[in-house]
Image: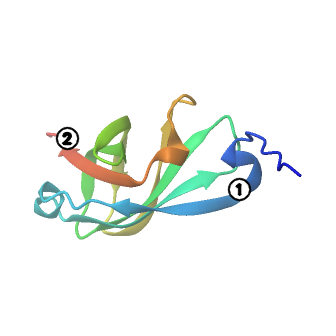
């Protein structure tokens, strides 16, 4: 008897769940008082590609946060968001184009660029 395998998008099985991603350290973040402790794929809607990142702000920060996605050593997506955050820990959501291969992504790296007054 042969087994039948269907190609079904992972999002159908993971709806309402999230999966952890490895976070690459970006040395420049520390100079702005930032650190990333966790990143997860948010799977609530198959048409919206979102990664939730927990960021610790050691001091107030206003600027651009960019998130890079990697499949192995190959960059497969990037997006950014401008934030104005007080000192503390917060989740920051990064939304990617629906064509981004989020489920083959294994690693993320965040970069920061402060806004100049």
Residue at 35% over, 45% down = 70
Give the residue pinned by disc 2: 115
Name the spot of residue 23 as percent of width and height, x first: 33, 61
Instruction: Indicate the quadrant where residue 46 lies.
Output: top right
Name the spot of residue 114 as percent of width and height, x first: 19, 45
Image height check: is 23 above or below 10? below
Closer to the camera in the image, 61 or 16: 16
Closer to the camera in the image, 19 or 9: 9
Query: Of discs 1 and 2, which sits in the foreground?
Result: 1
21 to the left or right of 11: left
Instruction: Indicate the quadrant where residue 56 lies.
Output: bottom left
Circle 1 SS class: helix
Residue at 51% over, 37% down = 101
13 to the left or right of 105: right
Closer to the camera in the image, 46 or 104: 104
Give the residue pinned by disc 1: 14
């Amino acid at each position: 008897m042969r087994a039948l395998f269907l190609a079904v998008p992972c999002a159908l099985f993971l709806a309402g769940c999230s999966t952890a991603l490895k976070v690459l350290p970006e040395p420049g973040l520390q100079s702005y008082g930032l650190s990333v402790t966790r990143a997860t794929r948010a799977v609530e809607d198959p048409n919206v590609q979102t990664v939730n990142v927990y960021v610790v702000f050691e001091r107030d920060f206003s600027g651009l946060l960019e998130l890079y996605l990697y499949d192995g050593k190959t960059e497969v997506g990037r997006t950014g968001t401008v934030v104005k955050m007080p000192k503390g820990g917060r989740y920051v959501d990064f939304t990617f184009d629906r064509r981004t291969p989020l489920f083959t992504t294994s690693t993320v790296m965040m970069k920061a660029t402060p806004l100049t007054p």
